[in-house]
Image (cartoon, rainbow, N blue to C red):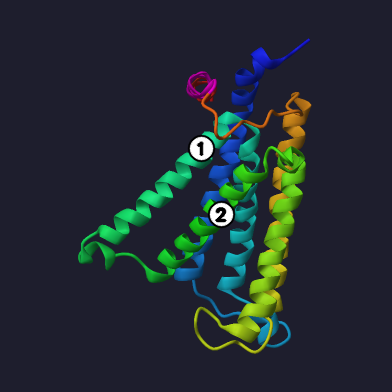
C-alpha cells in the first residue's frame, strides 16, 4: 500500500525538530562570533603557542558545533519540502542582505564589522555552492541525502575545512591576508574536532528519535517542480503552528 498521501503530514511532523536543530546551530555560531570578538582572558599554554587555549579556541569549539547542526540541516533539507523551503528562504535572505549592504549609504556600511561581513560572505558563498551542488546531484545520488549519511558527509567536510585552514593555510599561506603563522595551532584543531564530535552526537540523537517515530524513508523533493508545493507549504505552516501552540 502506498503511503504517498500521508507524505506532507509526515514531513511536517518532523519539521519543528529539524528547525530547532538549525536554530540551535545558528545560535551557537553567533555565540562563537561574539565570544571571539568580545571575551578576553589569558590563554592557558600547555606546550607553547601551538597548544594555547584561549577565547578563540573556545569560540572554535562552539562554532564548529553549530556548523555541524546548521550544515546538516541544509544538506538534509533536500529530503523534505518544508526543510527545503527554509533553506531556499535563507539563501534568498542572505543574497538580499548582501545587495542591501552593497547599496546602503556610507553611514550604514560603517556600522558593519569588516570581519563579520567577511565571515558572512564566506559562509553564504559555500552555502549557495552547496545548494547548487545538491540540486545537481540529488536525482543521481539520493542516498547521499539520507539523514545519517548526510551527517557523515557533514562531519568529513568540516574536518577537511579545519585541517585545510589550520594545518595548511594559516601556517604556510596567510592568516586573514596577513603573513603565515609558521606553526600549527593544534589547540584550535583539537577544539574544532571536539565541536564536530559534540555536534554529531546531538544530530545523531535527533535522527534516532525521528527514526523511532517512523521517519526513516523521507522522499527527496524535486527542486525544479512546483507540483504539490502549495499543499506542502500550507501543511508546514498549519501543523508547525499547531505543534508550537502545544508547547
Look at the numbered disc 1 and give the secondary structure of its residue.
helix
Rendered position, 183 above or below 203:
below
**Residue on which disc 2 sits:** 129
Q: Residue at 37% across / 56% down in the picture?
A: 98
Residue in front for this viewpoint, 20 or 129: 129
Q: Point out the image quarter for the N terminus.
A: top right
**Residue 158 placement, left or right of 42:** right
Q: Are marks 1 and 2 in contact (CB under 8 Å)?
A: no
Residue furthest to the top in view is 1
Query: Horizontally, is 47 left or right of 171 in the view?
Result: right
In the depicted structure, whether residue 176 falls above or below residue 28: below
The magenta stretch is: 227-239
Give the residue pinned by disc 1.
86
Mark drawn on residue 50? none
- Across and down, in percent, residue 228 comes to 54, 20
Q: Is residue 235 magenta?
A: yes
Above or below for 102 versus 147? below
User: Viewer-proximal residue, 43 or 153?
Assistant: 153
Residue 61, position in %: x, y?
64, 63
- Dot placed on the residue nearer the N-terminal end, 1 or 2: 1
**Residue 192 image offset from top left, x and y in percent:** 68, 65
Could you tell me which residue is drawn at 57 percent across and 30 percent down?
81
Q: Position of residue 14 (x, y in %)?
A: 64, 28
Callout 2: 10 Å neighbours few (<14), some, many (20+)? few
State whether residue 209 is above or below residue 118. above
Amino acid at each position: 500500500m502506498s503511503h504517498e498521501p500521508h507524505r506532507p503530514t509526515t514531513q511536517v511532523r518532523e519539521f519543528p525538530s529539524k528547525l530547532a536543530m538549525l536554530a540551535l546551530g545558528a545560535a551557537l555560531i553567533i555565540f562563537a562570533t561574539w565570544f571571539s570578538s568580545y571575551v578576553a582572558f589569558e590563554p592557558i599554554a600547555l606546550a607553547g603557542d601551538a597548544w594555547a587555549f584561549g577565547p578563540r579556541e573556545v569560540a572554535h569549539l562552539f562554532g564548529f558545533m553549530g556548523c555541524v547542526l546548521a550544515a546538516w540541516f541544509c544538506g538534509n533539507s533536500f529530503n523534505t519540502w518544508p526543510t527545503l523551503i527554509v533553506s531556499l528562504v535563507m539563501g534568498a535572505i542572505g543574497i538580499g542582505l548582501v545587495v542591501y549592504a552593497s547599496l546602503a549609504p556610507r553611514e550604514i556600511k560603517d556600522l558593519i564589522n569588516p570581519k563579520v561581513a567577511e565571515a558572512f560572505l564566506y559562509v553564504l558563498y559555500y552555502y549557495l555552492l552547496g545548494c547548487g551542488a545538491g540540486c545537481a546531484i540529488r536525482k543521481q545520488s539520493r542516498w547521499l541525502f539520507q539523514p545519517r549519511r548526510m551527517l557523515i558527509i557533514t562531519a568529513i567536510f568540516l574536518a577537511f575545512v579545519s585541517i585545510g585552514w589550520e594545518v595548511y593555510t594559516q601556517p604556510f599561506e596567510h592568516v586573514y591576508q596577513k603573513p603565515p603563522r609558521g606553526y600549527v595551532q593544534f589547540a584550535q584543531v583539537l577544539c574544532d574536532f571536539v565541536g564536530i564530535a559534540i555536534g554529531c552526537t546531538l544530530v545523531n540523537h535527533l535522527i534516532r528519535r525521528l527514526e523511532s517515530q517512523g521517519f526513516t524513508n523521507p522522499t527527496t523533493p524535486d527542486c525544479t517542480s512546483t507540483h504539490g508545493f502549495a499543499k506542502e507549504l500550507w501543511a508546514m505552516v498549519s501543523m508547525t503552528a499547531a505543534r508550537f501552540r502545544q508547547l
